[in-house]
Image (cartoon, rainbow, N blue to C red):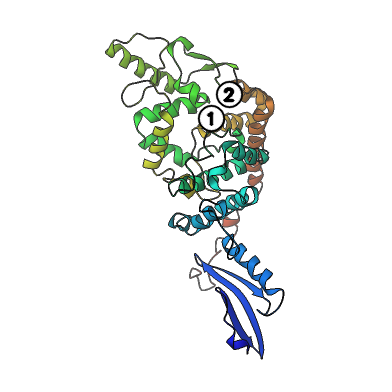
Amino acid sequence: MAGDIRLEKYVQRKVARGREYFFFRVVRQGQELRRPLPHPFDAEYRAAYNAAHHEAFGTVPGEFESPKAIARLIRDHKDSARYAKLPKASRLLRDYALDLMVDRWGAFDADQIRPIHVQAVYDSLSERPATANRRLDDMSAVFSWGRTRGFADDNPCRRIERVQSEESYEPWPDDRLEILIGQGKRHIVKVALVALYTGQRRADVIGMCETQIRDGIWTIEQGKTGNPVTVPLHPVVLAIIEEERASRRKAQIVAPALPLLTNSRGKPWGKGFGASWTKELIRLKLRPQSVEEIEAGQFRPTFHGLRTTNATVIANTVARSPELFGGIQRVQAMLGHLSERMSKHYARRAEVEHLNRETVLLLPDFGKQNPESGKHEDGEAAK
Protein backbone atom coordinates (compact mmCIF):
# COMPACT_ATOMS: atom_id res chain seq x y z
CA MET A 1 0.00 0.00 0.00
CA ALA A 2 1.22 3.49 -0.87
CA GLY A 3 0.21 4.72 2.54
CA ASP A 4 2.69 2.29 4.12
CA ILE A 5 5.67 3.81 2.30
CA ARG A 6 8.22 5.28 4.68
CA LEU A 7 8.86 8.70 3.17
CA GLU A 8 12.24 10.39 3.25
CA LYS A 9 12.84 13.65 5.03
CA TYR A 10 11.15 16.69 3.40
CA VAL A 11 8.85 14.46 1.29
CA GLN A 12 5.10 14.91 1.65
CA ARG A 13 2.26 12.80 0.25
CA LYS A 14 -1.11 14.21 -0.78
CA VAL A 15 -4.18 12.39 -2.02
CA ALA A 16 -6.67 14.24 -4.23
CA ARG A 17 -9.51 12.71 -6.22
CA GLY A 18 -8.15 9.26 -5.62
CA ARG A 19 -4.66 10.06 -6.90
CA GLU A 20 -1.39 10.26 -4.97
CA TYR A 21 0.96 13.22 -5.26
CA PHE A 22 4.45 13.50 -3.75
CA PHE A 23 6.32 16.73 -3.05
CA PHE A 24 9.72 17.79 -1.76
CA ARG A 25 8.92 20.68 0.61
CA VAL A 26 11.20 22.85 2.74
CA VAL A 27 10.37 26.15 4.52
CA ARG A 28 13.34 28.32 5.47
CA GLN A 29 13.20 31.90 6.68
CA GLY A 30 9.52 31.95 5.79
CA GLN A 31 10.25 30.96 2.17
CA GLU A 32 8.79 27.74 0.81
CA LEU A 33 10.58 25.52 -1.70
CA ARG A 34 8.13 23.00 -3.14
CA ARG A 35 9.02 20.60 -5.96
CA PRO A 36 6.87 17.76 -7.39
CA LEU A 37 8.33 14.26 -7.17
CA PRO A 38 7.58 10.98 -8.97
CA HIS A 39 6.25 8.07 -6.94
CA PRO A 40 9.04 6.77 -4.64
CA PHE A 41 8.92 3.42 -6.48
CA ASP A 42 9.52 5.08 -9.88
CA ALA A 43 12.97 4.97 -11.46
CA GLU A 44 13.03 8.78 -11.81
CA TYR A 45 12.35 9.40 -8.11
CA ARG A 46 15.94 9.30 -6.80
CA ALA A 47 17.29 11.80 -9.34
CA ALA A 48 14.35 14.16 -8.75
CA TYR A 49 14.75 13.97 -4.95
CA ASN A 50 18.51 14.60 -5.15
CA ALA A 51 17.99 17.58 -7.48
CA ALA A 52 15.43 19.14 -5.11
CA HIS A 53 17.67 18.51 -2.09
CA HIS A 54 20.62 20.09 -3.89
CA GLU A 55 18.52 23.12 -4.81
CA ALA A 56 17.48 23.57 -1.20
CA PHE A 57 20.73 22.79 0.60
CA GLY A 58 23.51 22.72 -1.97
CA THR A 59 24.22 19.03 -1.39
CA VAL A 60 22.88 15.59 -2.26
CA PRO A 61 21.98 13.34 0.72
CA GLY A 62 24.97 11.28 1.78
CA GLU A 63 27.36 13.45 -0.22
CA PHE A 64 30.41 14.69 1.66
CA GLU A 65 30.38 18.41 2.19
CA SER A 66 33.38 20.31 3.50
CA PRO A 67 32.62 22.39 6.59
CA LYS A 68 34.18 25.33 4.72
CA ALA A 69 32.35 24.85 1.41
CA ILE A 70 31.07 27.95 -0.40
CA ALA A 71 27.65 26.28 -0.62
CA ARG A 72 27.59 25.78 3.14
CA LEU A 73 28.76 29.34 3.79
CA ILE A 74 25.92 30.67 1.67
CA ARG A 75 23.36 28.34 3.22
CA ASP A 76 24.40 29.22 6.79
CA HIS A 77 24.46 32.92 5.95
CA LYS A 78 20.92 32.78 4.56
CA ASP A 79 19.83 31.05 7.78
CA SER A 80 21.48 33.75 9.93
CA ALA A 81 19.87 36.59 11.84
CA ARG A 82 22.12 38.99 9.93
CA TYR A 83 20.52 38.00 6.63
CA ALA A 84 17.02 37.96 8.09
CA LYS A 85 17.35 41.56 9.31
CA LEU A 86 18.24 42.90 5.87
CA PRO A 87 15.53 45.06 4.26
CA LYS A 88 13.65 43.24 1.52
CA ALA A 89 15.35 45.17 -1.31
CA SER A 90 18.79 44.63 0.22
CA ARG A 91 18.08 40.92 0.62
CA LEU A 92 17.25 40.69 -3.07
CA LEU A 93 20.56 42.33 -3.99
CA ARG A 94 22.38 40.07 -1.54
CA ASP A 95 20.82 37.04 -3.25
CA TYR A 96 22.20 38.21 -6.60
CA ALA A 97 25.68 38.19 -5.08
CA LEU A 98 25.13 34.79 -3.48
CA ASP A 99 23.99 33.34 -6.80
CA LEU A 100 27.12 34.78 -8.40
CA MET A 101 29.31 33.14 -5.75
CA VAL A 102 27.66 29.75 -6.34
CA ASP A 103 28.00 30.10 -10.09
CA ARG A 104 31.69 31.02 -10.01
CA TRP A 105 32.99 29.24 -6.89
CA GLY A 106 30.35 26.67 -5.94
CA ALA A 107 32.79 23.74 -6.18
CA PHE A 108 35.38 25.29 -3.84
CA ASP A 109 35.91 25.94 -0.15
CA ALA A 110 35.65 29.52 1.09
CA ASP A 111 39.30 29.54 2.23
CA GLN A 112 40.41 28.63 -1.32
CA ILE A 113 39.09 31.88 -2.77
CA ARG A 114 41.84 34.46 -3.24
CA PRO A 115 41.70 38.17 -4.16
CA ILE A 116 42.72 37.25 -7.72
CA HIS A 117 39.54 35.19 -8.04
CA VAL A 118 37.38 38.00 -6.67
CA GLN A 119 39.08 40.51 -8.96
CA ALA A 120 38.29 38.31 -11.97
CA VAL A 121 34.60 38.23 -11.07
CA TYR A 122 34.60 41.97 -10.38
CA ASP A 123 36.31 42.72 -13.71
CA SER A 124 33.65 40.69 -15.53
CA LEU A 125 31.08 43.23 -14.26
CA SER A 126 33.23 46.33 -14.77
CA GLU A 127 31.11 47.72 -17.60
CA ARG A 128 28.43 48.31 -14.96
CA PRO A 129 30.41 49.96 -12.16
CA ALA A 130 27.48 50.49 -9.80
CA THR A 131 26.46 46.83 -10.13
CA ALA A 132 30.06 45.62 -9.78
CA ASN A 133 30.55 47.66 -6.60
CA ARG A 134 27.29 46.47 -5.08
CA ARG A 135 28.09 42.82 -5.79
CA LEU A 136 31.55 43.27 -4.30
CA ASP A 137 30.12 44.89 -1.17
CA ASP A 138 27.66 42.05 -0.70
CA MET A 139 30.25 39.33 -1.30
CA SER A 140 32.59 41.06 1.11
CA ALA A 141 29.85 41.15 3.74
CA VAL A 142 29.28 37.39 3.35
CA PHE A 143 32.99 36.55 3.58
CA SER A 144 33.34 38.85 6.58
CA TRP A 145 30.41 37.11 8.27
CA GLY A 146 31.94 33.71 7.48
CA ARG A 147 35.46 34.65 8.60
CA THR A 148 34.49 34.82 12.26
CA ARG A 149 32.68 31.48 11.90
CA GLY A 150 35.67 29.51 10.68
CA PHE A 151 35.04 29.48 6.94
CA ALA A 152 38.20 31.41 6.07
CA ASP A 153 41.02 33.26 7.80
CA ASP A 154 40.78 36.35 5.61
CA ASN A 155 38.27 38.25 3.49
CA PRO A 156 39.40 37.89 -0.16
CA CYS A 157 37.32 40.92 -1.18
CA ARG A 158 39.65 43.30 0.62
CA ARG A 159 41.97 45.50 -1.44
CA ILE A 160 40.15 44.79 -4.69
CA GLU A 161 40.84 47.45 -7.32
CA ARG A 162 37.46 49.03 -7.98
CA VAL A 163 36.23 50.70 -11.12
CA GLN A 164 36.04 54.41 -10.50
CA SER A 165 32.88 55.79 -12.07
CA GLU A 166 31.96 59.34 -11.22
CA GLU A 167 28.54 58.77 -12.77
CA SER A 168 27.70 56.49 -9.87
CA TYR A 169 28.08 59.25 -7.25
CA GLU A 170 24.85 61.15 -6.69
CA PRO A 171 24.69 64.88 -5.98
CA TRP A 172 23.57 65.70 -2.46
CA PRO A 173 19.91 66.78 -2.05
CA ASP A 174 19.47 70.18 -0.39
CA ASP A 175 17.88 68.78 2.76
CA ARG A 176 20.78 66.37 3.37
CA LEU A 177 23.32 69.14 2.83
CA GLU A 178 21.50 71.29 5.38
CA ILE A 179 21.80 68.53 7.96
CA LEU A 180 25.49 67.96 7.24
CA ILE A 181 26.45 71.63 7.28
CA GLY A 182 24.06 72.75 10.04
CA GLN A 183 24.50 69.86 12.47
CA GLY A 184 27.86 68.31 11.57
CA LYS A 185 31.03 68.65 13.64
CA ARG A 186 33.09 71.64 12.63
CA HIS A 187 36.25 69.74 11.63
CA ILE A 188 34.21 67.53 9.28
CA VAL A 189 32.04 70.34 7.91
CA LYS A 190 35.08 72.42 6.97
CA VAL A 191 36.41 69.69 4.71
CA ALA A 192 32.97 69.15 3.19
CA LEU A 193 32.52 72.86 2.47
CA VAL A 194 35.89 73.13 0.75
CA ALA A 195 34.99 70.14 -1.43
CA LEU A 196 31.54 71.55 -2.16
CA TYR A 197 32.81 75.00 -3.19
CA THR A 198 35.86 73.83 -5.13
CA GLY A 199 34.63 70.56 -6.65
CA GLN A 200 37.92 68.83 -5.88
CA ARG A 201 38.53 65.27 -4.72
CA ARG A 202 38.97 64.30 -1.08
CA ALA A 203 42.72 63.64 -1.23
CA ASP A 204 43.35 67.03 -2.84
CA VAL A 205 41.08 68.84 -0.37
CA ILE A 206 42.65 67.43 2.80
CA GLY A 207 46.09 67.95 1.25
CA MET A 208 45.54 71.66 0.49
CA CYS A 209 48.44 73.73 1.85
CA GLU A 210 49.72 77.32 1.92
CA THR A 211 52.22 76.78 -0.90
CA GLN A 212 49.30 76.11 -3.28
CA ILE A 213 47.38 79.30 -2.47
CA ARG A 214 48.18 82.78 -3.73
CA ASP A 215 45.94 85.84 -3.90
CA GLY A 216 42.82 83.76 -3.28
CA ILE A 217 43.68 81.26 -6.04
CA TRP A 218 44.27 77.58 -5.32
CA THR A 219 46.60 75.95 -7.86
CA ILE A 220 46.93 72.19 -7.65
CA GLU A 221 48.05 69.21 -9.66
CA GLN A 222 45.27 66.72 -9.07
CA GLY A 223 46.41 63.60 -7.29
CA LYS A 224 44.28 61.25 -9.38
CA THR A 225 44.77 62.59 -12.91
CA GLY A 226 47.84 64.78 -12.60
CA ASN A 227 45.89 67.59 -14.28
CA PRO A 228 46.88 71.14 -13.26
CA VAL A 229 43.81 73.04 -12.03
CA THR A 230 43.48 76.68 -10.94
CA VAL A 231 40.53 77.29 -8.61
CA PRO A 232 39.44 80.78 -7.48
CA LEU A 233 38.39 80.29 -3.87
CA HIS A 234 34.92 81.18 -2.67
CA PRO A 235 34.67 83.56 0.34
CA VAL A 236 33.44 80.64 2.49
CA VAL A 237 36.59 78.67 1.68
CA LEU A 238 38.80 81.72 2.27
CA ALA A 239 37.19 82.16 5.70
CA ILE A 240 37.92 78.52 6.57
CA ILE A 241 41.53 78.92 5.47
CA GLU A 242 41.92 82.06 7.55
CA GLU A 243 40.51 80.22 10.56
CA GLU A 244 43.15 77.52 10.15
CA ARG A 245 45.88 80.13 9.70
CA ALA A 246 44.82 81.83 12.95
CA SER A 247 45.05 78.51 14.82
CA ARG A 248 48.57 78.01 13.49
CA ARG A 249 49.66 81.49 14.47
CA LYS A 250 48.32 80.89 17.95
CA ALA A 251 50.22 77.60 18.17
CA GLN A 252 53.31 79.29 16.64
CA ILE A 253 53.45 76.77 13.80
CA VAL A 254 55.26 77.82 10.63
CA ALA A 255 54.96 75.04 8.03
CA PRO A 256 53.72 76.25 4.61
CA ALA A 257 53.80 72.73 3.14
CA LEU A 258 51.71 71.26 5.96
CA PRO A 259 48.04 70.60 5.00
CA LEU A 260 45.78 73.36 6.30
CA LEU A 261 42.63 71.45 7.23
CA THR A 262 42.86 69.68 10.58
CA ASN A 263 40.99 67.09 12.62
CA SER A 264 39.45 67.48 16.07
CA ARG A 265 42.93 67.30 17.65
CA GLY A 266 44.28 70.08 15.47
CA LYS A 267 46.41 67.69 13.40
CA PRO A 268 46.38 67.50 9.56
CA TRP A 269 44.04 64.86 8.20
CA GLY A 270 45.53 61.58 7.02
CA LYS A 271 44.04 58.19 6.35
CA GLY A 272 41.71 58.63 9.32
CA PHE A 273 39.37 61.01 7.51
CA GLY A 274 37.38 58.23 5.84
CA ALA A 275 36.52 56.60 9.17
CA SER A 276 35.65 59.94 10.77
CA TRP A 277 33.48 60.91 7.81
CA THR A 278 31.54 57.65 7.96
CA LYS A 279 31.12 57.92 11.74
CA GLU A 280 29.74 61.44 11.37
CA LEU A 281 27.25 60.44 8.67
CA ILE A 282 25.97 57.69 10.94
CA ARG A 283 25.72 60.08 13.90
CA LEU A 284 23.71 62.54 11.81
CA LYS A 285 21.50 59.65 10.61
CA LEU A 286 22.41 60.44 7.01
CA ARG A 287 23.21 56.77 6.49
CA PRO A 288 22.72 53.54 8.48
CA GLN A 289 25.42 51.78 10.46
CA SER A 290 26.05 49.34 7.61
CA VAL A 291 25.93 50.01 3.87
CA GLU A 292 24.08 46.72 3.54
CA GLU A 293 21.09 48.42 5.15
CA ILE A 294 20.84 51.06 2.41
CA GLU A 295 17.87 50.06 0.29
CA ALA A 296 17.92 50.01 -3.49
CA GLY A 297 17.18 53.46 -4.91
CA GLN A 298 17.94 55.18 -1.61
CA PHE A 299 20.35 58.15 -1.64
CA ARG A 300 23.90 57.13 -0.76
CA PRO A 301 25.77 60.01 0.84
CA THR A 302 29.37 59.96 -0.36
CA PHE A 303 32.15 62.48 -0.10
CA HIS A 304 32.64 62.30 -3.86
CA GLY A 305 28.98 63.25 -4.17
CA LEU A 306 29.99 66.76 -3.04
CA ARG A 307 32.13 67.02 -6.18
CA THR A 308 29.14 65.83 -8.21
CA THR A 309 26.98 68.45 -6.49
CA ASN A 310 29.44 71.19 -7.45
CA ALA A 311 29.50 70.01 -11.07
CA THR A 312 25.70 69.70 -11.22
CA VAL A 313 25.12 73.21 -9.90
CA ILE A 314 27.61 74.68 -12.39
CA ALA A 315 26.13 72.65 -15.25
CA ASN A 316 22.60 73.77 -14.37
CA THR A 317 23.67 77.40 -14.51
CA VAL A 318 25.50 76.82 -17.78
CA ALA A 319 22.41 75.16 -19.26
CA ARG A 320 20.34 78.29 -18.63
CA SER A 321 22.70 80.41 -20.70
CA PRO A 322 25.58 78.55 -22.37
CA GLU A 323 26.53 81.63 -24.41
CA LEU A 324 27.04 83.63 -21.21
CA PHE A 325 28.65 80.94 -19.05
CA GLY A 326 30.79 79.11 -21.60
CA GLY A 327 29.18 75.69 -22.01
CA ILE A 328 30.74 72.44 -20.81
CA GLN A 329 34.20 74.02 -20.83
CA ARG A 330 33.13 75.75 -17.60
CA VAL A 331 32.58 72.39 -15.89
CA GLN A 332 35.71 70.88 -17.39
CA ALA A 333 37.91 73.80 -16.32
CA MET A 334 36.59 73.84 -12.74
CA LEU A 335 36.82 70.11 -12.08
CA GLY A 336 39.91 69.40 -14.15
CA HIS A 337 38.46 66.44 -16.02
CA LEU A 338 40.97 64.68 -18.24
CA SER A 339 38.40 64.31 -21.03
CA GLU A 340 35.15 65.98 -22.02
CA ARG A 341 33.13 62.81 -21.37
CA MET A 342 32.24 63.52 -17.74
CA SER A 343 31.81 67.24 -18.40
CA LYS A 344 29.32 66.40 -21.15
CA HIS A 345 27.57 64.01 -18.79
CA TYR A 346 26.87 66.77 -16.26
CA ALA A 347 26.01 69.30 -18.96
CA ARG A 348 23.61 66.91 -20.73
CA ARG A 349 21.83 66.05 -17.50
CA ALA A 350 21.51 69.74 -16.64
CA GLU A 351 20.20 70.64 -20.10
CA VAL A 352 17.48 67.98 -19.84
CA GLU A 353 16.54 69.16 -16.37
CA HIS A 354 16.40 72.78 -17.56
CA LEU A 355 14.30 71.91 -20.62
CA ASN A 356 11.90 69.89 -18.48
CA ARG A 357 11.42 72.85 -16.15
CA GLU A 358 10.53 75.02 -19.13
CA THR A 359 8.22 72.34 -20.52
CA VAL A 360 6.30 72.17 -17.25
CA LEU A 361 5.54 75.89 -17.58
CA LEU A 362 3.65 75.17 -20.80
CA LEU A 363 1.07 73.17 -18.87
CA PRO A 364 -1.98 74.90 -17.36
CA ASP A 365 -2.40 75.07 -13.60
CA PHE A 366 -4.87 72.23 -13.40
CA GLY A 367 -5.57 72.81 -9.74
CA LYS A 368 -7.05 76.27 -10.43
CA GLN A 369 -9.09 75.56 -13.56
CA ASN A 370 -12.24 74.85 -11.56
CA PRO A 371 -12.54 76.63 -8.22
CA GLU A 372 -15.24 74.14 -7.22
CA SER A 373 -12.95 71.16 -7.93
CA GLY A 374 -13.10 68.60 -5.16
CA LYS A 375 -16.52 69.65 -3.91
CA HIS A 376 -19.96 68.01 -4.08
CA GLU A 377 -22.91 69.87 -5.56
CA ASP A 378 -24.12 70.64 -2.06
CA GLY A 379 -20.90 72.56 -1.43
CA GLU A 380 -19.35 70.11 1.00
CA ALA A 381 -15.78 69.01 0.41
CA ALA A 382 -15.43 65.63 -1.25
CA LYS A 383 -14.32 62.92 1.03
Mark toward the start of the polypeptide (1 vs 2): 1
**Residue located at (41% from left, 29% from top):** 273
* Residue denoted by label 1: 307
Residue type (three-letter) at the residue carrying disc 2: Leu
Tell me how many marks there are. 2
For the N terminus, the quadrant is bottom right
**Residue located at (61% from left, 30% from top):** 315
Q: Residue 102: x, y in percent?
A: 61, 52
**Disc 2 secondary structure class:** helix
Q: Residues within 10 Å of mark 2 (few under 14, many from 20)?
A: many
Q: Residue 223: x, y in percent?
A: 54, 20
Front position in the image: 307 or 48:
48
191, above or below 26, in the image:
above
Query: Residue most toward the right?
Result: 43
**Disc 1 secondary structure class:** helix
Front position in the image: 212 or 120:
120
284, above or below 313, in the image:
below
Residue type (three-letter) at the residue carrying disc 1: Arg
Q: Residue 327: x, y in percent?
A: 66, 25
Front position in the image: 281 or 184:
281
**Residue located at (46% from left, 45% from top):** 147
Note whether residue 380 is visible: yes
Q: CA gap, disc 1 to disc 2?
A: 8 Å
Q: Which mark is residue 335?
A: 2
Q: Which mark is residue 361?
A: none
**Residue located at (58% from left, 49% from top):** 97
Q: Quadrant of residue 256?
A: top left
